[in-house]
Image (cartoon, rainbow, N blue to C red):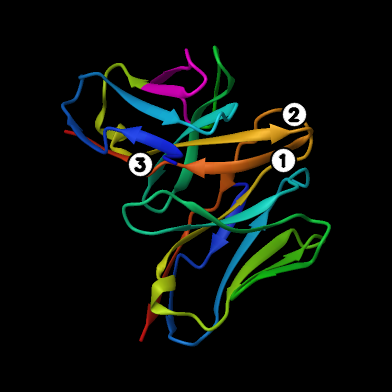
Amino acid sequence: NAGVTQTPKFRVLKTGQSMTLLCAQDMNHEYMYWYRQDPGMGLRLIHYSVGEGTTAKGEVPDGYNVSRLKKQNFLLGLESAAPSQTSVYFCASSYSKGLTNYGYTFGSGTRLTVV
Amino acid sequence: QQQVKQSPQSLIVQKGGISIINCAYENTAFDYFPWYQQFPGKGPALLIAIRPDVSEKKEGRFTISFNKSAKQFSLHIMDSQPGDSATYFCAATIAYSGAGSYQLTFGKGTKLSVIP
């Protein structure tokens, strides 16, 4: 039972390079999220998805794009990386039953350094 | 605008002591208040959660106290152990409105160190 799997675990980028972070969940969850974690800042929501083919902006979306072509996958893209995007990125997923949301589960994170 | 304020930033407690972490929120629409525990190199993991219709919830050595009128909630770790050393995040969300996905608003975290 893998839960939420993030790849890669570590990456170093040069300023201006692009990359895609992959999140995969095997729990059939409808909702998926991307957060970034910075020292002293907690976790801040970048983008989220309420279902296949739908995405929405979170608190800090600038400089990132996302896609959810399959229910189990949620991709986070950096088109032109900047040093300010150095962070640890966490993917999460959850589901709903009736009017209640459940099962918020996080992956183990991707540590990204932009030099 | 920080919707969930968490204190202290760091906490050092002797083994066997009580660790207390406090959070305050602003949005009265929040209806679910989880606490997450994060070990170095790992993702946050749900520790315990509470809804505002109860004032306290206890699971083993972990207790959440909730004060709806003051818009505050706290985590108490009884008989703290070195294995409890981790970063703790409080969070808040609207989970029961049926509005779709629920986005967690996190506090900034408290780094707990339990010394032998």
Magenta range is: A60-76
In the displayed structure image, the side of residue B105 where residue B25 appears, left or right: right
The kind of secondary structure element at disc 1 is: loop
Q: Nearer the viewer, residue A107 or A3?
A: A3
The residue that label 2 is drawn on is B99
Q: Residue at x 41, y 53 (%)?
A: A40
Q: Chain of mark 2?
A: B
**Quick check: marks 1 and 2 in contact, CB under 8 Å?**
yes
Q: CA distance from mark 1 to mark 2?
A: 8 Å
Name the residue type under label 3: Gly
Location of residue A98 with respect to A77 vertically, above or below:
below
The residue that label 1 is drawn on is B94
10 Å crowding of disc 1: few (<14), some (14-19), many (20+): many
Q: CA distance from mark 3 to mark 1?
A: 25 Å
Q: Nearer the viewer, residue B17 or A30?
A: A30
- How far from the left and from the top, in percent, is residue A76? 39, 23
Q: Residue at x 52, y 20 (%)?
A: A71
Q: Which mark is residue A50?
A: none
Name the residue type under label 1: Ile
10 Å crowding of disc 3: few (<14), some (14-19), many (20+): many
- How far from the left and from the top, in percent, is residue B27? 72, 45
Which is nearer the N-term, disc 1 or disc 2? 1
* Image quadrant in which the N terminus of chain B is located: top right
Location of residue A1 with respect to B17 vertically, above or below:
above
Q: Chain of mark 1?
A: B
| Residue A57 placement: quadrant | top right
The residue that label 3 is drawn on is A109
Q: Nearer the viewer, residue B45 or A25?
A: A25
